[in-house]
Image (cartoon, rainbow, N blue to C red):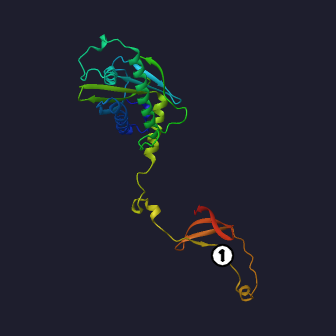
Amino acid sequence: MLDPRTLGRPVHLLPAFALRFSADLAEFLRGTLNRRYGMQLLVSDATMTRQPQPDEARRWHVYESATGRIGLALDRSLVLRVLQCRYGLQEKQQDVDLGTVPVNASEERLTQRLGQEMVMTLMSRIRHGLQQLASESGLADGDQASWRAESSDAAGAWWIKVRLGEARSGLQADLRFSLDDAWMNELLSQLAGWRSEPKEPLKNDAKPLASRIQVKLVAQLLQRRMALGDILDFRVGNIIPVSLQATDVLVKNSRLFTATVAEHKGKLWLTAFNDTK
């Protein structure tokens, strides 16, 4: 479905943004869960699409910042796997009906904290667009994500879906991030700025033809008709009164412009060019 609000905006760069974010998320997992608990989580896929309607009911954790709201729906199997590794429980992921496993306070706290760190990673990537991340997160002071509430509705229509997997335990889990209008506008603005920057300086032969053609301009400052007798009466030191106003600008004796003569720091300058009729 065509969204008129996206016309003229860099929507075509969203797949590239999703891949950049998946790389950031993979680095986050490597430095936290994998290193801390000996897990082997890998990111296998990442896409960003607009969801006109929810595909199914989900449990969204909504995080709020100074810019707007971001929702995160993560599979419960991922949280339970982290808890298993934290407390040294069974090594392999068992086929358990998660609906029969009660939710405890530890799982709730882990879900909120893990979601907050992932949302902060997404916020940092949005701030940088497609550019390489700096050593720090680059978030403005006070623009921190805080858990707000659970919701059955997504924060917005644009979703980022990331697939995680762990071969050792057979875990396959999905992360779904939803952006509200404020964060989506921020993302598109960052991508538009990246799009407008030239990837490399233009070579001389790639510049417009008009900027590569050089012509010599000749300014005819004045032209005055005088009688021959007056010219013969000239003596050294005589002064001919003239007034520099509009002058002609020629290219190979062809009159193309008229200009005004001005004085600046002891030099004469041409200004206020006008095409000749």
Of 117 and 65, nearer the camera is: 117
Q: Position of residue 172 (x, y in %)?
A: 27, 26
Q: Which residue is mark 1?
A: 223
Q: Is residue 265 left or right of residue 72?
A: right
Is residue 16 something one can see in this rendering?
yes
Q: Position of residue 151 (x, y in %)?
A: 43, 17
* The furthest residue to the front: 88
Q: Give, as a three-letter code, the residue at label 1.
A: Gln
Of 276 and 6, nearer the camera is: 6
The answer to whether 129 is drawn above or below residue 75 in the figure is: below
Of 206 and 38, nearer the camera is: 38
Mark 1 element type? loop
The answer to whether 60 is drawn above or below residue 126 in the figure is: above
Report the quarter where the N terminus lies.
Answer: top left
Is residue 157 something one can see in this rendering?
no
Residue at (43, 42) in percent of width and height: 133
Q: Position of residue 215 (x, y in %)?
A: 50, 69
Crowding at label 1, few (<14), some or many (≥20) Cα neighbours within 10 Å? Answer: few
Question: Image quarter for residue 250?
Answer: bottom right
Question: Image quarter for residue 37?
Answer: top left
Q: Position of residue 247 (x, y in %)?
A: 64, 69
Residue at (60, 61) in percent of width and height: 274
Q: Is residue 202 left or right of residue 256?
A: left
The answer to whether 97 is drawn above or below residue 208 in the figure is: above
Question: Image quarter for residue 187?
Answer: top left
Q: Is residue 217 left or right of residue 244?
A: left
Residue at (30, 10) in percent of width and height: 100
Of 59 and 141, nearer the camera is: 141
Report the quarter where the C terminus lies.
Answer: bottom right
In this rendering, the count of numbered labels is 1
